[in-house]
């Protein structure tokens, strides 16, 4: 949605407010064109500060997430930044992973995303490889747990 909004209205400033884990989504929303990411559970003062920062034309991230991205950008500065295997998934792979966790079949995912079943199967295989899972059952269980934790 962010990419579509930015394509039609490039000057719009977008701040994403979500309950989802910023370590998985913050960098993705920035790449898509948003100017910041704030967790909905933050104090009102923090959310207002994020809005002001975006309105000033600056990027907003939590201090923890900003440090994490900067460390990754400069090679960790001697410290290794742990990256979750989920973070290695592309945006589309993450979308398919979430739909698997919601219990959708390959054909249902294909219909929802306007893809062929073969393409969804390819995504499933890539996800299994990236997450080091051997079977479709392991993938489904892992996806379900992830959806439950991030709902």
Image (cartoon, rainbow, N blue to C red):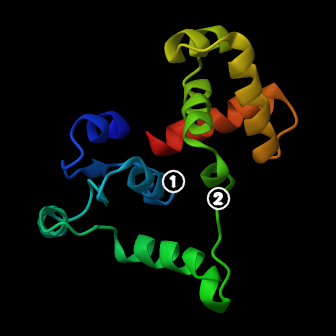
- As drawn, the label of residue 84 is 2
User: Which mark sits nearer the N-terminus, 1 or 2?
Assistant: 1
Pointer 1 with pointer 2, Cβ within 8 A: yes
Residue 24 image label:
1
Q: Residue at x 25, y 34 (%)?
A: 8
Name which residue lies at 11% across and 67% down: 52
The C terminus, quarter of image: top left
Quadrant in which residue 101 is drawn:
top right
Q: Nearer the viewer, residue 90 or 102?
A: 90
Disc 1 from disc 2: Cα separation: 8 Å
Q: Secondary structure at mark 2?
A: loop
Circle 1 SS class = helix
Place residue 81 in its image quadrant.
bottom right
| Residue at image point 31% right, 52% down | 34
Percent across and percent down for residue 141 are 70, 33
Q: Quadrant of the N terminus?
A: top left
Above or below residue 150? Residue 23 is below
Q: Residues within 10 Å of mark 2 (few under 14, many from 20)?
A: few
């Amino acid at each position: 949605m962010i990419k579509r909004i930015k394509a039609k209205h490039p000057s719009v400033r977008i701040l994403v407010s979500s309950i989802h884990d910023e370590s998985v989504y913050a960098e993705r929303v920035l790449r898509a064109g948003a100017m910041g990411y704030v967790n909905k559970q933050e104090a009102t003062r923090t959310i207002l500060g994020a809005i002001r920062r975006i309105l000033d034309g600056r990027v907003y991230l939590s201090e923890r997430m900003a440090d994490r991205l900067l460390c990754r950008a400069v090679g960790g500065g001697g410290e290794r930044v742990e990256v979750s295997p989920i973070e290695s998934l592309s945006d589309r792979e993450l979308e398919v992973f979430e739909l698997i966790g919601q219990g959708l079949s390959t054909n249902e995912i294909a219909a929802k995303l306007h893809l062929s079943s073969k393409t969804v199967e390819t995504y499933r295989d890539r996800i299994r490889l990236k997450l080091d899972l051997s079977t479709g059952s392991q993938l489904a269980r892992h996806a379900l747990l992830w959806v439950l934790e991030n709902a």
